[in-house]
Image (spheres, rainbow, N blue to C red):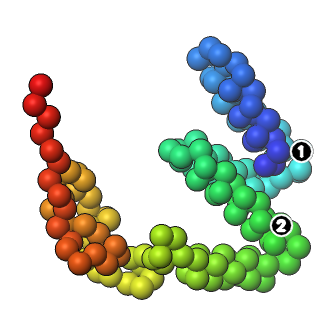
Amino acid sequence: MELGVDLLRMAAVHTPTPLGSAMGLIAAILIGDIAVKSGLFVNEVVLYMAVASIGMFATPSYELGLANRIVRLVLLLAVAAFQVPGFMIGTTVLTIFLTTHRSYNSSYMWPFIPFNAKAMSEILVRKPVLSSKTRPSFNKTRDNTRVPPTQKND
């Protein structure tokens, strides 16, 4: 199913007109319906792939989309090999990997792990970056105030 979604996405990309995208969408619906009626897939698999495809198209960063696809494929292989225990083990390994990984000398899951309520609220309710008067707390700077942007005189 993953291969089929990739083929449909490639066909939509290489068809330059808006009609090509509409035709790709109709083709996806028809192929999904035929796959379910022929017994190749069950409804849940088609629904899962539809949600995963929407998430893939809604991801703003191409690199993040590729990372999400790799994680999804690894979890699919774990589930195919070991069913529910494979999903549980794969999810646990992924969570442990993300919590132990560090980027720029801070936890990759910051502010969730270690939990920082103030920083979490600032991430959930975003202010414009230029209106912020302080730096993020994970920087651990001596002076956490930001330098105001300089005005150019033309």
Q: Is residue 48 visible?
A: no
Q: Is residue 9 visible?
A: yes
Q: Residue at x 88, y 73 (%)?
A: 81
Helix, strand or loop at label 2? It is helix
Relative height, residue 152 to residue 114 (above, below): above
Name the residue furthest front: 153
| Residue that appears at 85% across and 78% down | 82
Residue 30: assigned label: none
Q: Alpha carbon of mark 1 to alpha carbon of mark 2: how far?
A: 24 Å
The x, y position of residue 1, in whole percent, is 81, 48
Identify the residue position indicated by label 2 in the image. 77
In front: 70, or 146? 146
> Could you say where residue 6 lies in the image, as x and y percent from the top left?
76, 40
Task: Say whether residue 126 is left or right of residue 138.
Answer: left
Quarter holding the C terminus is: top left
Residue 38: mark: 1
Measuring 23% from the left and 78% from the top, which residue is drawn there? 142
Q: Amino acid type of disc 1?
A: Ser
Measured from the top left, where is residue 90 in percent x and y?
Answer: 73, 77
Q: How many marks?
A: 2
Going by the image, does 150 lie left or right of 75?
Answer: left
